[in-house]
């Protein structure tokens, strides 16, 4: 199970880091900007959202070596993406909610692997 958690944690960390980069780059991805406009996220929130993603990625990686942090990171990321799903659904953007739902599933997989690792 440790190998499974490690793989899930590394893949999630890479994805979260790339996603955070796309938010804070001087010219953010037009698709991401449009999606965030759809759900009424102001530009001033891009950096804090990116910081949360980076923190989650870093703590997931630390969780490879210290399981309690991996569990905490996975729970925090599930809550983060659950919030994203709720925001998309409140804005009636069901298409945009698909991505966060998939990421919730990946975070739950990390959580399950972290709690069952020996």
Image (spheres, grey):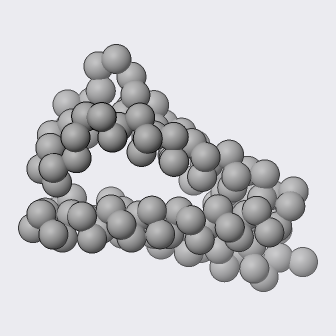
Considering depth in this image, is 8 or 20 the residue closer to the camera?
Answer: 20
- Residue 71 higher or lower than 14, as above or below: below
- The reply to whether residue 47 is in sight is yes
Considering depth in this image, is 72 or 9 the residue closer to the camera?
Answer: 72
- Name the spot of residue 50 as percent of width and height, x first: 45, 40
On the image, which quarter does residue 34 sit in?
top left
Please give left or right for residue 55 compared with residue 31 in the image.
right
On the image, which quarter does residue 87 sit in?
bottom left
**Farthest top residue?**
26
**Farthest front residue?**
44
- Residue 62 higher or lower than 69, as above or below: above
- The reply to whether residue 103 is in sight is no
Identify which residue is drawn at 71% across, 75% down. 113
- Name the spot of residue 106 as percent of width and height, x first: 52, 67
On the image, which quarter does residue 36 sit in?
top left
The quadrant in which the N terminus is found is: bottom right
- Residue 21 higher or lower than 16, as above or below: above
Please give left or right for residue 23 compared with residue 105 in the image.
left
Please give left or right for residue 78 compared with residue 43 in the image.
right
Identify which residue is drawn at 18% across, 70% down. 89
Identify which residue is drawn at 12% across, 63% down. 91
- Name the spot of residue 81 as percent of width and height, x first: 41, 64
Identify which residue is drawn at 75% across, 79% down. 115
Please give left or right for residue 108 compared with residue 48 in the image.
right
Considering depth in this image, is 85 or 105 the residue closer to the camera?
Answer: 85
């Amino acid at each position: 199970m440790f190998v499974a958690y490690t793989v899930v944690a590394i893949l999630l960390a890479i994805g979260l880091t790339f996603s955070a980069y796309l938010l804070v780059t001087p010219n953010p991805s037009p698709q991401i900007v449009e999606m965030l406009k759809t759900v009424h996220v102001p530009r001033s929130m891009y950096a804090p959202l990116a910081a949360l993603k980076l923190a989650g990625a870093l703590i997931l990686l630390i969780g490879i070596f210290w399981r309690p942090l991996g569990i905490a990171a996975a729970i925090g990321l599930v809550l983060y993406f659950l919030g994203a799903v709720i925001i998309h659904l409140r804005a009636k953007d069901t298409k945009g909610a698909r991505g966060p739902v998939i990421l919730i599933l990946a975070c739950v997989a990390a959580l399950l692997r972290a709690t069952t690792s020996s």
